[in-house]
Amino acid sequence: MEVKSNCPKCSGQMEQGFVIDNGYRVPIVSEWTAGAGPPQWSFWTGKIKSVTRQITTYRCTKCGFLESYAG
């Protein structure tokens, strides 16, 4: 994954982190999902049928700008 060190908006320092989604009583890291159109749910598992990539987010310590990458 590409490591960002300077903010593209203000040239401040970028720090690596992640965005948490609140699942059913369990916090999880957000994921990017491939595919065009609406999500397709699996009848058997109740989950979305797709390829996912965990999202890494960088935050500028100066202006707060967020930049995300799907690894």
Image (cartoon, rainbow, N blue to C red):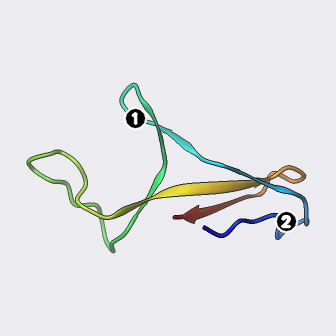
**Crowding at label 1, few (<14), some or many (≥20) Cα neighbours within 10 Å?**
few
Give the vertical position of 1 relative to 23 (above or below): below
Q: Quadrant of the N terminus?
A: bottom right
Residue in the picture at 58% in, 46% down: 19
Residue in the picture at 75% in, 65% down: 4
Looking at the picture, how far across and down is residue 36, in whole percent?
33, 74
The mark that comes first in sequence, 2 or 1, is 2
Residue in the picture at 59% in, 56% down: 56
| Circle 2 SS class | loop
Return the residue at label 2.
6
Give the vertical position of 11 relative to 25 (above or below): below
**Crowding at label 2, few (<14), some or many (≥20) Cα neighbours within 10 Å?**
some
Distance from the alpha carbon under mark 2 to that under mark 1: 32 Å
Q: Does residue 33 appear to the left or right of 29 in the view shown?
A: left
Return the residue at label 1.
23
Q: Nearer the viewer, mark 2 or mark 1?
A: 2
Identify the amino acid type marked 2.
Asn
